Amino acid sequence: METIALNTRLKPGKEADYDRIHASIAPELHAALASAGVHDWRIWRSGRELFHVVQVEDYRAMRRQLAAHPVNITWQARMAELLEVDDDYSGDDNGITQVWSFAQDPAGGTDA
């Protein structure tokens, strides 16, 4: 299981549209995500900034599987209307680099 953090940005004025569209995703998209190994996908929004935390069996495999999935292609086209940068699923990214974890540094580490 992997936990991946992502950051995306909305186009100006698209905040309410994004919130409305994500109030409940289509059952077909939910099924496609689950089939691709997604266990949870949480999104926070601060203004136009979106922060995602994805719990998935294998992030890169999930992206490869969804890249050609018709439901995801339709979803990504809809998201492209809202996001500053389209996600074409062509990369081998690992999300945002983690720099610290409270749980992995229980003693507080050393002073820098």
Image (cartoon, rainbow, N blue to C red):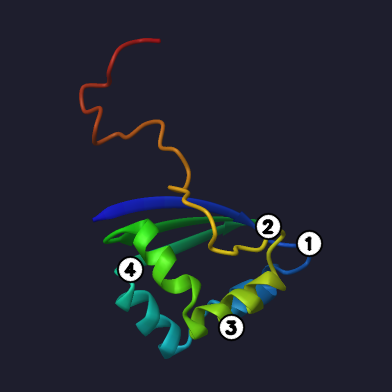
According to the picture, the residue beneath numbered tag 2 turns out to be 48
- Residues under numbered marks 1 and 3 in contact, where contact means CB atoms less than 8 Å apart: no
Residues at marks 1 and 3, CA–CA distance in whole angstroms: 22 Å
- Please identify the residue farthest to the bottom as the structure is shown: 27
Name the front one of labels 1 and 3.
Answer: 3
Q: How crowded is mark 3: few (under 14 residues within 10 Å), some or many (20 or more)?
A: few
Name the front one of labels 2 and 4.
Answer: 4
Name the front one of labels 4 and 1.
Answer: 4
Which numbered disc covers residue 74? 3
Residues at marks 1 and 2, CA–CA distance in whole angstroms: 7 Å
According to the picture, the residue beneath numbered tag 1 turns out to be 12
Comes first in the chain, label 4 or label 1: 1
Is residue 81 placed above or below 112 in the rendered structure?
below
- Residues under numbered marks 1 and 2 in contact, where contact means CB atoms less than 8 Å apart: yes
According to the picture, the residue beneath numbered tag 4 turns out to be 38
Residue for point 49% across, 71% down: 67
Identify the secondary structure beneath mark 4: strand
The quadrant of the picture occupied by the C terminus is top left
- The spot of residue 96 in percent (x, y) is 48, 43
- Please identify the residue farthest to the right as the structure is shown: 12
> Residue 64 versus residue 2: which sits nearer the camera?
64
> Residue 94 versus residue 44: which sits nearer the camera?
94
Identify the secondary structure beneath mark 1: loop
Residues at marks 4 and 3, CA–CA distance in whole angstroms: 18 Å
Name the front one of labels 2 and 3.
Answer: 3
